[in-house]
């Protein structure tokens, strides 16, 4: 079976970009965080930090315990996007590449004599040398996997990090995969792993030996058969899936952990989602609202359904009506917002239908709302997002809340995500937004916040500065954090 795919995976990408921009950080443990708070988590860690046990999802306070000298940097999505384009251009000089699968991964398809092992390896080495020649390395390095299909090439790229090169040919299979843990295979997360364990599949050797029907039964769908084929080197056509929902979430900074702050951020998130909805030419028939609170297991949850629509004023009115009940709860002392402040918020537009697939309402008021939305889109696309905005979003904009994020699985545009204020920053050169990791980071951050509630004394000892439910105040210094036991804020 011939080699078809060369998969490039940039190692510890976010942290590597920070080390590239600040050479003094080379060789030092670095963690990138979504906000400067002890109760959030690392969203990326350099290999020097990983040597201390710090990884994606490690709470900041725990990272400081594991590695007191770790340098924390707040994420700079626009910078990572700009570097993504430069790195893709460097790869393009060596081999045409496919569509980037994330901001730090891209498959390249081999054709003709490129599929011969020696030639494929030569291309991989040219890519690595190109990074050196253009000055990206040693800060930014990549691991490369070469295999008969994209699935195995991606798996191979993870087998030798950092800066590795792994080739999987038909003769190497399945033996070369037997050393991997189940979770090290692409597409096997916690839930799939549990299904495999229930099916009696505990090792990679058992996974590779399982029959097609066994994997279908384990997955509970045809995905098991697709997995069986991919393990054997078959390249399968991508599955086209219709978008079912569209939304945004945000972990609130300390300065926004009030009812008014959460409300402003929710309005901003929904306005941004509505703009994306229109851009992608969908109508929404449902709206989900979620708010988590510090120190409370119960969440604020609302799921609305309505005639399909896409205009911002109507959606914001629906959101405001639902949030009024929270305001009433404060007034009637059923919710103590100071004791249990809001921690994270999320809005999701659901039941999406393509524009033109259904008949819309003809009411005059709806026509005005749609006209307002179209005007907002036109002005904000031309002059920058949130050049014109609804007043209810003011506090969120003042605090620069819910900025552009880097995710794993979707490709929205910078014009729909990045605020006009962010565009004025000289260090943030943005061409377009590649891949938000917001949803994954939100889950990780919420888990970090939950752990923080269980370890208040340890956090105080690490940070050397007591803090309450509001958390730390964000700082602007780029100096490394003070070591535990010193006075003052780490930020």
Image (cartoon, helix red, strand yellow):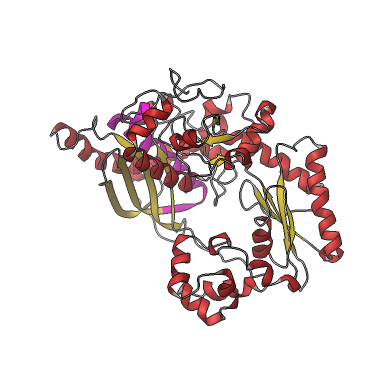
Q: Is residue 322 left or right of residue 104?
A: left
The percent coordinates of residue 445 (x first, y second) are: 42, 42
Q: Nearer the viewer, residue 426 or 160?
A: 160
Can you tell which quarter of the image residue 451 is in?
top left
Tell me if residue 313 can be seen: no
The percent coordinates of residue 68 (x first, y second) are: 51, 30
Image quadrant containing the N terminus: bottom right
Q: Is residue 119 left or right of residue 148?
A: right
Confirm whether the magenta stretch covers residue 273. Answer: yes
Q: Nearer the viewer, residue 257 or 369?
A: 257
Tell me if residue 134 can be seen: yes
At 56% from the left and 64% from the top, the residue drawn is: 240
490, above or below 329, in the image: above
The percent coordinates of residue 425 (x first, y second) are: 59, 24
Task: Magenta stretch: give its range.
Answer: 254-283
Can you tell which quarter of the image residue 83 is in?
top right
């Amino acid at each position: 079976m011939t080699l078809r795919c060369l998969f490039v995976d940039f190692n510890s990408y976010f942290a590597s970009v920070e080390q590239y921009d600040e050479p003094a950080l080379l060789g030092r443990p670095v963690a990138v965080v979504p906000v400067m708070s002890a109760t959030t988590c690392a969203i990326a860690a350099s290999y020097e930090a990983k040597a201390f046990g710090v990884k994606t999802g490690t709470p900041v306070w725990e990272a400081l315990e594991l590695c007191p000298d770790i340098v924390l940097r707040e994420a700079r999505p626009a910078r990572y996007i700009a570097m993504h384009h430069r790195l893709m251009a460097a790869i393009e000089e060596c081999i045409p590449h496919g569509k980037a699968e994330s901001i730090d991964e891209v498959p390249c398809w081999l054709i003709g004599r490129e599929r011969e092992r020696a030639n494929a390896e030569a291309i991989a080495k040219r890519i690595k040398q190109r990074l050196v020649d253009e000055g990206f390395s040693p800060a930014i390095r990549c691991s490369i996997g070469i295999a008969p299909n994209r699935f195995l090439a991606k798996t191979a790229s993870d087998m030798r990090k950092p800066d590795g090169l792994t080739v999987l040919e038909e003769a190497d299979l399945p033996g070369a995969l037997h050393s991997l843990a189940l979770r090290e295979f692409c597409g096997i997360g916690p839930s799939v792993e549990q299904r495999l364990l229930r099916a009696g599949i505990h090792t990679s050797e058992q996974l590779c030996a399982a029959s097609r029907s066994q994997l279908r039964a384990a997955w509970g769908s045809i995905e098991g058969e697709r997995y069986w084929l991919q393990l054997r080197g078959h390249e399968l056509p991508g599955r086209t899936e219709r978008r079912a929902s569209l939304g945004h979430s945000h972990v609130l900074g300390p300065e926004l952990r009030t009812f008014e702050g959460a409300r402003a951020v929710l309005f901003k998130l929904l306005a941004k989602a509505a703009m994306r909805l229109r851009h992608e030419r969908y109508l929404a028939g449902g709206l989900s609202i979620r708010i988590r609170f510090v120190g409370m297991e119960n969440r604020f949850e609302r799921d609305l359904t309505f005639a399909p629509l896409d205009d911002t004023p109507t959606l914001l009115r629906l959101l405001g009506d639902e949030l009024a009940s929270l305001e009433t709860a404060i007034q009637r002392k059923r919710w103590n917002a100071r004791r249990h402040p809001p921690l994270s918020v999320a809005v999701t537009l659901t039941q999406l239908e393509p524009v033109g697939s259904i008949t819309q309402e003809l009411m005059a008021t709806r026509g005005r709302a749609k006209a307002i939305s179209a005007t907002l889109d036109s002005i904000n696309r031309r002059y920058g997002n949130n050049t014109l905005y609804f007043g209810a979003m003011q506090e969120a904009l003042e605090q620069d809340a819910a900025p552009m994020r880097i995710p794993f699985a979707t490709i929205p545009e910078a014009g729909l995500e990045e605020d006009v204020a962010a565009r004025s920053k000289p260090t943030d050169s943005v061409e377009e937004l590649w891949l938000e990791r917001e949803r994954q980071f939100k889950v990780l951050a919420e888990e970090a916040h939950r752990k923080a509630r269980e370890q208040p004394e340890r956090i105080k000892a690490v940070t050397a500065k007591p803090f309450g439910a509001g958390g730390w105040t964000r700082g602007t210094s780029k100096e490394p954090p003070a070591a535990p036991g010193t006075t003052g804020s780490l930020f």
